[in-house]
Amino acid sequence: MISSYYHKHSVSYRNNEITIALRLAMELILDSAITEEVEDISKWGVLDGVTTNPSLIRKSGANFEDTIRKIAEICPGPISAEVTSHSTNEMIEEAIDLKSRLPKNVIIKIPCTPDGLAATKTLSERGIPVNVTLIFSVSQALLSAKAGAAYVSPFVGRLDDIGQDGLGLIEDISQVWGVQGIKNCKILAASIRSRRHVEVSAKLGAHAATIPYSIFTELIQHELTDSGLDKFKSDWEAVKSEGRA
Ligand code: E4P
C-alpha cells in the first residue's frame, strides 16, 4: 500500500507486506480566484489546492460563493476561503456557515489576530481545518500552531516589500517546527513574487507554497527545454524523411 502526503519517507514491514509512506514534493497551491487560471493549472496534474482572499475575489470580478464552488469542483485539494468578520464569535459563525454550505474540500482562512486565534482554536476543535493568514513573525506562526491551525501562511513577498527578509522568516519558522517537533501544522509560504521564492521555500522546508498564476507558469519554463525540444523535433523529421521511422 502506498499512501501520500506524509512528511517523511518511511518504509515499514508487517506480515510480509511493505508499506511505503512517502512525502510527495511540497504542496503546490494556486493563489487565485480566477476559475480559468485554476482550470489551466489543474490540467498539469500537479495542483494541490487553491487559496483565495477578499482582494483576489475582488480582482476576479465574480461572485464569492459561485467562484469558490467552481474552484472546489475543478481542484479536489484544499480551497481556502477567507472569513471577513473580525470578532471571534462572528468568525466562528461565518466559518461554520461557509463550511455547511460550500463543498467539503473548502477550508477556512482566518487572520492572525487574538480573535482569530480564539476562532481557530474553536474551529479546529470542531474538526474544521483553518489556514491562519497574514503571518509576519515566528511568534505569530507559533501561536497559530498552538491554536490548532492546519496551515500557517507567512507572507514572504510583503516582508520583502518593506525591506525585511521574507525567506528568512520561512527558514526561522521551519527551524522552530523542527526543534519543537510540530507535525500537524503545515508551513504555507504565501505572497510569493518569484520562482526563487518557490525554490528557496522548498529548500528551507516549507510544506506548501501558494503561487500566483504568472509565477506558476514561469516554473515550467526554461529556454534550454525549448531549444532542446526544437532540436529533437527537427532531428526526428530528418529521421522520418530518411525513411528510418
Ligand atoms: C495568501 O494566501 C494570500 O492570498 C497571498 O499569498 C497574498 O499575496 P500578496 O502579497 O501577493 O497579495
Image (cartoon, rainbow, N blue to C red):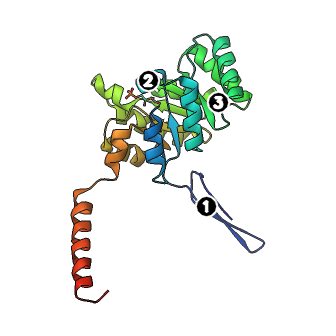
| SS at mark 2 in the image | loop
Q: Position of residue 160 (x, y in %)?
A: 30, 28
Image depth: mark 2 or mark 1 in front: 2
Quarter where residue 103 is shown: top right
Q: Which-is-in-front pick, marks 2 and 3?
A: 2
Residue found at x 56% / y 31%: 68
Separation (CA) of disc 2 from disc 3:
33 Å
Disc with the residue nearer the chain's start (2 vs 3) = 2
Report which residue position mark 1 lands on.
Answer: 10
**Residue 220: where, in percent of width, then height?**
34, 53
* Image quadrant where residue 65 sits: top right
- Residue located beneath label 3 in the image: 148
Label whose residue precedes the other's in the sequence (2 or 1): 1
Residue 110 horizontal side relative to residue 233, left or right: right
Quick one: SS at disc 1?
A: strand
Quarter of the image for residue 78 reads: top right
Q: Which of 194 and 61 is in front in this view?
A: 61
Left/right placement of residue 182 relative to residue 202 reads right
- Mark 2 is surrounded, within 10 Å at the Cα level, by few (under 14), some (14 to 19) or many (20 or more) other residues, namely few
Q: Residue at x 49, y 29 (%)?
A: 52
The amino acid sitting under disc 2 is Gly
- Is any atom of residue 194 visible in this view? yes
Give coordinates of residue 5: x percent, y percent: 59, 51
Q: Which residue is drawn at 21% across and 71% down?
A: 231
In the foreground, 218 or 235? 235
